[in-house]
Amino acid sequence: MVQAQAVRQLSYIQAVNEAIRQEMERDETVIVMGEDIAGGGDREDKQDAWGGPMRLTKGLVGDFGRQRIRDTPISEAGFVGAGVGAAASGLRPVVDLMYVSFFGVCADQITNNAAKIHYMFGGKVNIPLTIMTGIGAGTGSAAQHSETLYSIFTHFPGLKCVVPSDPYTAKGLMIAAIRDNDPVIVFNNRQLMGIRFDVDVPEEAYEVEIGKSNIAKEGTDVTLVGIGYTTKVCLDAAAELEAQGHSAEVLDLLSLSPMDDEAILESVQKTRKIVIVDEDYPRCSIASDISALVAEQAFDYLDAPPRRVNPPHAPVPYSRPLEALWVPNKDTVVEAALGVLE
């Protein structure tokens, strides 16, 4: 008889923190590095003052010490590069890149080194590197701290890219990323960190498979594709559409590279209509990629053109009212869905 796992509800932050903690307990080669993840530099009276800007690493330095929880200088190129080197040398580093907008400072380390070393060394060197980074608007953090940008990373072969949508997938994908022998980037949307979820999270360690999506809600009339926070937006829109007599299926993408093309096409073949909701900039976006996939491989099933819901091609506004208009929301998704349902 298989014994059931103990489950309880956690916040998104608690789920990520628990994933890191359990993997550090399981495997002594797992280390964490980044800015302010331990707090206080070498001052013992200021240890763990913050736990990173999203508090994802809070409490870890007290249990694992400063050799495994390493505060770094404010140099993304330096500590991401150190993470790549540590991974090549046999460790499993978790690197906290505070905000994805900072990727430009360390892009060479990610796209030229982490992504390509395994290939260029003929498969003899693995890079088991996990980069976790904050994404998403809606928190009043202005243009340089509110971008999403995951589409950029999916362009590079050798990088795996995942976007959790709730505490359950946050813990499972984080554990899967740390255990993976390839570099994995985990994009954590900050709006999810302030939401209470009615989702059970097992106490035991578990993995959510990288490369697979999840049907968050079954439906028959239209497919709504969500990515991270926009999965919640899609579920809210699906409830509104249901009240208007339309059955919407919500596909929670979870993994952007590799992407679950089969699940997308299967859903479209069933509903014959699709709306992709993507918080990244519209040009060369994940929404554009999925739209092209559907147009090329499921054209004969479509009763309406694929519809993309992205922000405008403009920086994220600092103004709260403008920011609220910039981010895709339930109303814009409902409007797009009704447009393809007509």
Image (spheres, rainbow, N blue to C red):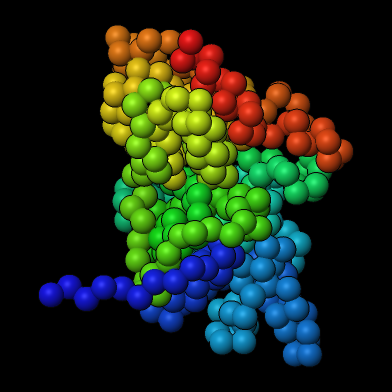
318 sits left or right of 171 in the view:
right
Quadrant (top left, top right, bottom left, bottom right) of the N terminus = bottom left
Q: Is 311 placed above or below 88 here?
A: above
| Residue at 43% across, 36% down | 250
| Residue at 78% across, 90% down | 45
12 sits left or right of 176 in the view:
right
Which residue sits furthest right?
319
289 sits left or right of 47 in the view:
left
Q: Is 7 placed above or below 61 here?
A: above
| Residue at 56% across, 50% down | 187
Task: Name the image quarter holding residue 321.
Answer: top right
Whole-percent x and y of residue 233?
57, 39
The residue nearer to you, when weighing 147 against 119, is: 147
Q: Is residue 221 visible?
A: yes
Which residue sits furthest bottom?
45
The residue nearer to you, when weighing 62 against 304, is: 304
93 sits left or right of 325 in the view:
left
Q: Is 20 placed above or below 81 here?
A: below
Q: Is residue 259 visible?
A: no
| Residue at 40% across, 28% down | 247
Number of numbered callouts drawn: 0
Whole-percent x and y of residue 12?
56, 61
